[in-house]
Image (cartoon, rainbow, N blue to C red):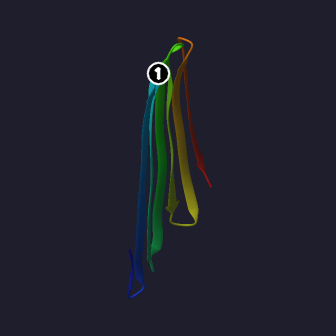
Amino acid sequence: LSQNVGGFGISSSNANANAFSQGFNPGGFGSSAANAQAQSFQSNSPFGSFGASAANAASQGFSFGPGGLSGSAGQSGSQTYNLPGNRKLSLSYSNGFSLANGTPSVSNGFSISQS
């Protein structure tokens, strides 16, 4: 979507994707799923501009077989803000979990920057 009237403009976009699978066999069964999204927005005027964008993704999967249960899940994303005066603020994050051989593991992270 994009519009521009009398020196004032606005544009935006959006996207989304999904995936899923599952399987069964004599040795066990498993499943996985994933999702990804992205959005953006930008506004311009004679008085300045402002914009924002975001993207994130998530996935998970597991299997069960002779070795027991194993799996993982993760999520990550980022956001960027375009501020007046050519300033930018960026944030990002990630989280994850896994289980293998009966041992769980967790990870996460976060960052913020300004320019």
Residue 55 drawn at (x, y percent): 48, 52
Circle 1 crowding by C-alpha within 10 Å: few under 14, some 14–19, many from 20: some
Disc 1 is placed on an element classified as strand
State the residue position of label 1: 28
* Whether residue 95 is situated above or below residue 66 in the rendered picture: below
Residue 60 drawn at (x, y percent): 46, 33
Considering the image in quadrants, where does the C terminus appear? bottom right
Q: Nearer the viewer, residue 62 or 37?
A: 62
Residue 37 drawn at (x, y percent): 44, 52
Q: In the rendered view, does 114 fall on the left or right side of 9?
A: right
Residue 82 drawn at (x, y percent): 52, 62
Query: Residue drawn at (53%, 46%), measured in percent from left and top?
Result: 91
Considering the image in quadrants, where does the N terminus appear? bottom left
* Whether residue 35 is situated above or below residue 97 in the rendered picture: below
The mark total stands at 1
Residue 12: image quadrant is: bottom left
Outermost residue, right side: 115
What's the amino acid at mark 1? Gly
Residue 24: image quadrant is: top left
Query: Residue drawn at (54%, 53%), measured in percent from left and top?
Result: 89
Outermost residue, front side: 26
Query: Residue drawn at (51%, 66%), measured in percent from left and top?
Result: 84
Q: Nearer the viewer, residue 24 or 61?
A: 24
